[in-house]
Amino acid sequence: MKKVLIEQLSKSDIRWMIANGDRQEVAAGTVLIRQQRAIETFYIVLEGAFSVTIQADSRSALASAFAVLENFVNLEEEIAQVTSGEVLGELSFFNMIPSAITVKAIENSVVLAFPYQKLLARLNQNSEFASRFYHAIAILLLNRFEHLVKKFTQNRNLKIPPLQDVPLLFGELNDSDIDWMIQHSQIEECSTDTILIQSGQPVEKIYILLRGSVSVSFSEENKSSLTRLFSILETEDHINFSPGYEISKISKGEILGDTALIDARLSNYTYKALENLQLLSIKKEYLLIKLQQNPARASRFYRVIAMLLSARLQGLISRLGYGRDSYRIGQELSENLSYSDEIDLDEIDNITLGGARFNWMLQRLKVLF
């Protein structure tokens, strides 16, 4: 994980970041990011280490019960540690909501800080840099997501809530991207209980779910990729592969197999149809080649994948925090407070545009609602 940025960015990218970042020393014990506070800075950790914690909702009986069982102090729990080469502030980077975590230095550290607006300006100006940057961030988010899934979901029986902002994701693409996908993909239909992607097997297609719902299960496999591949070849019906444990359900408008575009490892996820489905499919290798040939399109696709992973990660963190929010159901909202699930008014136009593009795509494909 530590080498992801270095491996994905070019020398010119790194030179720009060094020249434009603000090098800051952070003393041990300093809180760099505070939960439920707005954050407008993206950090790269150059030296040292940080603790990432969540503060659970003290009003929640479930949170209090877990605190007693697992000896948490003040309902605070460490969910990760971040060291040199990793990044901080990336979760709020995509939707500008208050931070879901607290980040504190556990030793004297050094970070390179970038105001969000300055970094966004560079990303908007240089599509090649944007493609490499969003690709790197997506990989880092995937690693963090899978770390938390392995650590928490099975023993606490947690489920990741379905995404509510799929139209916003389509708003990140442009009309030519949607038109290109329609021209280079095909509609597939499958019946209930069909396995679309099997854990432990290579991902051959990327899907957009047009109709129906899908169960997503995670399977932690300790064998090497080569060993797993030979096991696949030896077992035609794949009955030796465990489906793992369900972590989420996904519905219309979401992408299946998107992590295969950023990570060459065999899939850790099994996608199973919960009802009859209609999907738009595109071959993964073909899509990767086309993204390499078109940096502007690649930057938009990798940004969408990073946004999806960020939303899934925040959904999981929310479940770990047992829904800590600034208000309760039935409580009158205050104009003076920011709420963790509040929609940014600046994003409403993008959500509307994304929903229109998705519906336009369905009409072009003649999908029945």
Image (cartoon, rainbow, N blue to C red):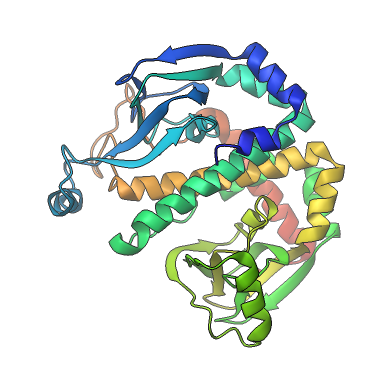
Q: Quadrant of residue 211?
A: bottom right
Q: Quadrant of residue 258?
A: bottom right
* Residue 196 place in picture, x, y as percent: 63, 73
Residue at 69%, 53% in the rendered image: 261
* Residue 177 place in picture, x, y as percent: 79, 46
The one of 177 and 45 positioned closer to us in this rendering: 45
Residue at 80%, 46% in the rendered image: 291
Left or right: where does residue 115 sit relative to residue 288? Answer: left
The one of 193 and 362 positioned closer to us in this rendering: 193
- The answer to whether residue 346 shows anywhere in this view is yes
* Residue 30 place in picture, x, y as percent: 32, 19
Left or right: where does residue 30 sit relative to residue 348? Answer: left
Which quadrant is the N terminus positioned in?
Answer: top right
Residue at 29%, 27% in the rendered image: 334
Left or right: where does residue 285 sit relative to residue 138? Answer: right
Which quadrant is the C terminus positioned in?
Answer: bottom right
Residue at 43%, 44% in the rendered image: 314
* Residue 221 place in picture, x, y as percent: 50, 67
Rendered position, 309 above or below 7: below
